[in-house]
Image (cartoon, rainbow, N blue to C red):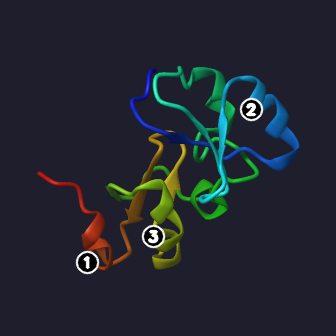
């Protein structure tokens, strides 16, 4: 897939040279590697947010797939905020969600627009 903006990656330090070799750039302000505009993100798939086991949200891995989920629209730079409130990462959907037992009102600023 082609991106028209920066696509930030979860690349561990020890793999930075390979990431750079594929064409990623370092954002010193965010302290993250990113795929620049127009470059195919497919070669970077192992570092996509939520794909790297070193960065995966471990609490979400244990969530029952049958649990009711309310998916959110969360920018990558806000993931720590929603995680702290109790949201979980769905690695298959590549989206944050509110588990069925949680209060959706706590996540109102990330509700999807209809």
Q: Closer to the N terminus: mark 2 or mark 3?
A: 2
**Residue shown at 52%/77% (left/top)?**
84
Q: Nearer the viewer, mark 1 or mark 2?
A: 2
Provide residue 113's location: percent of width, then percent of height. 16, 54
Q: Closer to the N terminus: mark 1 or mark 2?
A: 2
**Residue shown at 39%/30% (left/top)?**
4
| Label disc, if present, on residue 19 of the rendered structure | 2
In this orientation, which residue lies closer to the viewer: 67 or 71? 71
Which secondary structure, mark 3? helix
- As drawn, 39 above or below 75: above
| Label disc, if present, on residue 1 of the rendered structure | none
Crowding at mark 1 (Cα within 10 Å: few <14, some 14-19, many 20+): few
Label 1 and label 3: CA atoms lie apart by 12 Å
Provide residue 64's location: percent of width, then percent of height. 52, 56
Residue picked out by circle 1: 105
| Label disc, if present, on residue 82 of the rendered structure | 3
Which secondary structure, mark 1? helix
Callout 1–callout 3 Cβ contact below 8 Å: no
Tag count in the figure? 3
């Amino acid at each position: 897939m082609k991106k028209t903006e920066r696509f930030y990656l979860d690349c561990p330090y020890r793999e930075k040279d390979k990431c750079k070799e594929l064409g990623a750039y370092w954002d010193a302000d965010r302290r993250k590697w990113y795929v620049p505009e127009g470059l195919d993100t497919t070669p970077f798939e192992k570092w996509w947010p939520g794909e790297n086991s070193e960065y995966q949200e471990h609490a979400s891995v244990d969530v029952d797939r049958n649990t009711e989920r309310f998916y959110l629209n969360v920018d990558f730079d806000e993931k720590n905020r929603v995680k702290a409130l109790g949201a979980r990462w769905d690695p298959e959907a590549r989206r944050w969600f509110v588990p069925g037992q949680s209060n959706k009102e706590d996540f109102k600023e990330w509700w999807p627009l209809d």
